[in-house]
Amino acid sequence: MPMRFVLVCIAFFMGQITRAQRIEMVTEQGKCSIRGMSVVSDNIVWVSGSNGTVGRTVDGGKTWTWMQVKGHEKNDFRDIEAFDEKTAIIMAVGEPAFILKTFNGGSTWKRVYEDSSKGMFLDAMEFWENGNGIVVGDPIDNKIYVARTADYGVSWERYNTKSLPATDSGEAMFASSGTNIRKYSSQEAMVVTGGKRSRLLMHERWVDIPMLQGGNSTGANSLAVWNEAPRKARIVIVGGDFQQDSSTVGNCVYSTNGGRTWKIPEVPPHGYRSCVEFLTGQMLVACGTSGVDISMDGGKKWRLVSKESFHVCQRAKTGNVVYLAGSRGRIAKLVGY
Ligand SMILES: *[C@@H]1O[C@H](CO)[C@@H](O)[C@H](O)[C@H]1NC(C)=O
Ligand SMILES: *[C@@H]1O[C@H](CO)[C@@H](O)[C@H](O)[C@H]1NC(C)=O
């Protein structure tokens, strides 16, 4: 066979392989469990996790700067929101709960919120482009804990949750990836709960969802919203049972009509999943300790692309690169999508 033909064949074959989605490891820091991630652009990524750790790359993952936030070496930063390569906010779960902000790429951090109430446990933050932001925490006196900011997290105020419906006993939230709250309009956000009861909170009322629930480790962990038109929002919720992470029972539900009715996937994700993210209007990625799945049809069928464990996945806010992160400070990219 002429050499040129062989080379053309190999090039074609490799082209086919690289088109299939797969996970490509980027780095392994080794000393923290990452659950917070904020992908500002294809090149700028911030992550946060246990041992007071924050990591940052500004060159698409080629090099990473790791820092341990001074005075917070034992805190678990379960969520992070980054605005650019210099500015980010991190959330330490509790007790006391802290929110810290940096303006200089992580060299110094300013304490912008603190609540030492008993039972405090912050779960996740969400921000809008105009600087409005919200943080939610486990229920206190049967109401989800809420604090809000209107200035990119420089100042925060606890929100009076009188108008919110009460939580049930044993109903709380899992701080597994900072994604159990998601915005779905310029004003509003949705929240999913888990535990003895797992529901969706939207428009200040509870919506029942057919997720696994009833135990301590069961229920929704994350939701993703694709909102092209009001009342047509596509909502995908993942979770399951983190103590039985290969079980697919009740680990995913989705709605194509803004939460009025719910469907169970024909082929569910292949185990407990802690994070779900829309990549396009039909394409999703979900990850958890038992692997990573892709759906090409809005959540109806899921295909396992890796058995590697990851806690959190996110697509660049302005860009296309999808990053994943998890235990032992591991960070990867989803390639070929
Ligand atoms: C936190 O750091 C210590 C000391 O380096 C290490 O032994 C431990 O495994 C780390 N924790 C996690 C969750 O990686
Ligand atoms: C949930 O956790 C509590 C406290 O750790 C324990 O007493 C209870 O038996 C657990 N319930 C279930 C269903 O696992």
Image: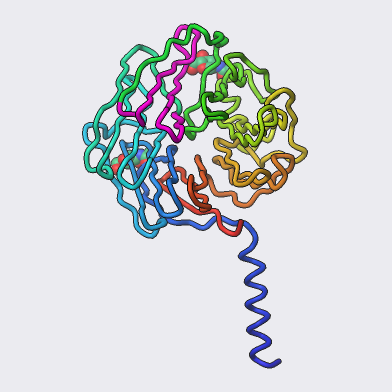
Q: Quadrant of the N terminus?
A: bottom right
Please, what is the dominant secondary structure of the magenta stretch? strand
Q: Residue furthest bottom?
A: 2
Examine the image and state in which quarter residue 198 appears.
top right
Of 234 and 124, nearer the camera is 234
Residue 262 x/y as whole percent: 73, 27
Left or right, 162 with respect to 52, comes to: right
Q: Residue furthest right?
A: 266
Residue 152 falls within the magenta-colored stretch: yes
Q: Residue at x 27, y 34 (%)?
A: 73
The span picked out in magenta is 125-154
Q: Residue at x 59, y 49 (%)?
A: 307
Left or right, 260 with respect to 276, comes to: right
Of 23 and 178, nearer the camera is 178
Residue 134 falls within the magenta-colored stretch: yes
Q: How many marks?
A: 0
Examine the image and state in which quarter residue 116 appears.
top left
**Color scheme of the displayed model:** rainbow
Q: Quadrant of the C terminus?
A: bottom right
Q: Is residue 323 above or below residue 186?
A: below
Q: Residue at x 44, y 45 (%)?
A: 39
Residue 245 x/y as whole percent: 60, 36
Left or right, 191 with respect to 114, comes to: right
Residue 18 x/y as whole percent: 61, 65
Residue 35 x/y as whole percent: 44, 37
Q: Residue at x 74, y 40 (%)?
A: 300
Q: Is residue 169 above or below residue 8?
A: above
Left or right, 17 with respect to 41, comes to: right
